[in-house]
Image (cartoon, grey):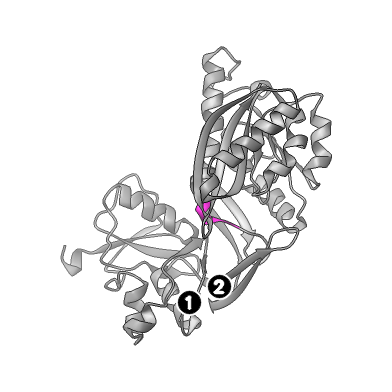
């Protein structure tokens, strides 16, 4: 392609990553040029061709500088030595318009931040992230580059998450698990439809036949939102006031207010009310979730499924969480069938974030 033929599509800034992912699928993304700001709320994404079915605001010519391929290229362009580049972060995450990065021992963190803004044209702020601490698992972050706006809307697999990264935690490494929970609910509803459940004219499960889910540690709606969007009715419990505020906002943002019943409470104060009318599925997205199994199981209908998360030492994956579920079920006089086990990501050195799915009879 000659320089005169090079094109870019202008799209809303908050759609940048979604558009890039779609262009990659269609082999139409131009990796040789960079995404560039276009106006206050849009960017120009370089393309090798313009897909006919891609919604864009405009198509423009020759936008984007020749691409520096990675962070090392940008830092080297700033005069960093190879020894300094060896200390630069090897990974980071883009959450909406914010880049989250652990700068570690890198010299001149502000230059790392500026380089990351160049690398990710859709972002406007870079945050150095510290530990998650406190009763409400609050993040410690520091602005190292950009506008300093920590509030954003992050989109993945069609779900929108509004949040303030200075107030609430967000784990990019849980992306596949969030998507998986939506798929699990969708498959369950398809199974109900095939078995004769009532459906509307469009084929959707009627409200009376929706799967009922309890999300015991809902946060801003990490799992609640994809499950509700897939058709479940969700009782979402969160005690952190900042997270709960964004949970309410996100329920409205994703248009699932009719399917989500939010509670700002300790989940152990909510589960007794569900014992008389138990749910079909319980999500326990907390690393010490096993401590709440005795409260969870009375709220789960016979044959229902629990998804228990845990931070497990590598030598005890998946033995320890399975033993904990089996022991809690035995104490409740119930049987267990292990349906699935998954490693979500590394939690820390020698410790894995895992999930066990179990049917409780």
The vertical placement of 85 against 173, above or below, is: below
Which percent across, then down, holds residue 311? 59, 50
Tag on residue 113?
1
Tag on residue 277?
none
Residue at disc 2, secondary structure: strand
Q: Is residue 127 magenta?
A: no
The quadrant of the image that shows the C terminus is top right
Whole-Å distance between the Cαs marked 2 and 1? 9 Å
Q: Which quadrant holds residue 8? A: bottom left
The quadrant of the image that shows the N terminus is bottom left
Q: Which quadrant holds residue 335? A: top right
Q: Which residue is mark 2?
A: 128
Which percent across, then down, holds residue 132? 65, 63
Which percent across, then down, holds residue 60? 31, 64
Q: Is residue 24 left or right of residue 137?
A: left
Q: Residue at x 51, y 37 (%)?
A: 341
Q: Earlier in the sequence, mark 2 or mark 1?
A: 1
Q: Is residue 229 visible?
A: no
Which percent across, then down, holds residue 54? 36, 48
Magenta stretch bounds: 170-174
Q: Residue at x 63, y 22 (%)?
A: 206
Residue at disc 1, secondary structure: helix
The answer to the question of whether label 2 and label 1 lie on touching residues, with beta carbons closer than 8 A, is: yes
């Amino acid at each position: 392609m000659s320089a005169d033929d090079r094109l870019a599509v202008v799209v809303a800034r908050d759609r940048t990553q979604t558009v890039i992912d779609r262009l990659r699928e269609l082999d139409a993304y131009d990796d040789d040029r960079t995404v560039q700001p276009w106006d206050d709320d849009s960017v120009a994404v370089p393309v090798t061709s313009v897909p006919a079915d891609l919604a864009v605001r405009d198509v423009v010519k020759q936008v984007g500088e020749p691409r520096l391929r990675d962070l090392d290229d940008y830092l080297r362009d700033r005069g960093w030595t190879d020894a300094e580049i060896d200390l630069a972060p090897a990974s980071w995450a883009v959450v909406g318009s914010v880049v989250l990065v652990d700068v570690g021992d890198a010299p001149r963190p502000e230059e790392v931040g500026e380089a990351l803004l160049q690398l990710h044209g859709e972002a406007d702020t870079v945050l150095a992230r510290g530990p998650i601490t406190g009763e409400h698992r609050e993040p410690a972050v520091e602005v190292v580059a950009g506008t300093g706006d920590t509030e954003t809307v992050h989109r993945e697999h069609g779900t929108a998450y509004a949040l303030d990264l200075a107030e609430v935690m967000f784990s990019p490494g849980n992306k596949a698990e969030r998507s998986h929970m939506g798929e699990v609910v969708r498959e369950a509803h398809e199974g109900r439809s095939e078995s004769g459940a009532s459906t509307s004219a469009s084929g959707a499960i009627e409200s009376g036949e929706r799967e009922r889910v309890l999300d015991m540690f809902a946060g801003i709606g990490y799992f609640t939102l994809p499950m509700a969007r897939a058709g479940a009715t969700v009782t979402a419990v969160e005690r952190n006031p900042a997270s709960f505020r964004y949970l309410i906002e996100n329920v409205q943002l994703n248009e699932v207010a009719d399917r989500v019943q939010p509670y700002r409470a300790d989940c152990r104060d909510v589960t007794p009310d569900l014992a008389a009318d138990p749910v079909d599925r319980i999500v326990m997205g907390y690393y010490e979730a096993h401590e709440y199994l005795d409260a969870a199981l009375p709220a789960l209908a016979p044959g229902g499924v629990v998804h228990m998360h845990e931070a497990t030492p590598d030598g005890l994956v998946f033995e320890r969480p399975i033993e904990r579920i089996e022991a809690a079920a035995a104490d409740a006089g119930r049987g267990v069938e292990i349906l699935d086990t998954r490693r979500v990501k590394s939690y820390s050195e020698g410790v894995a974030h895992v999930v066990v799915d179990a049917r409780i009879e």
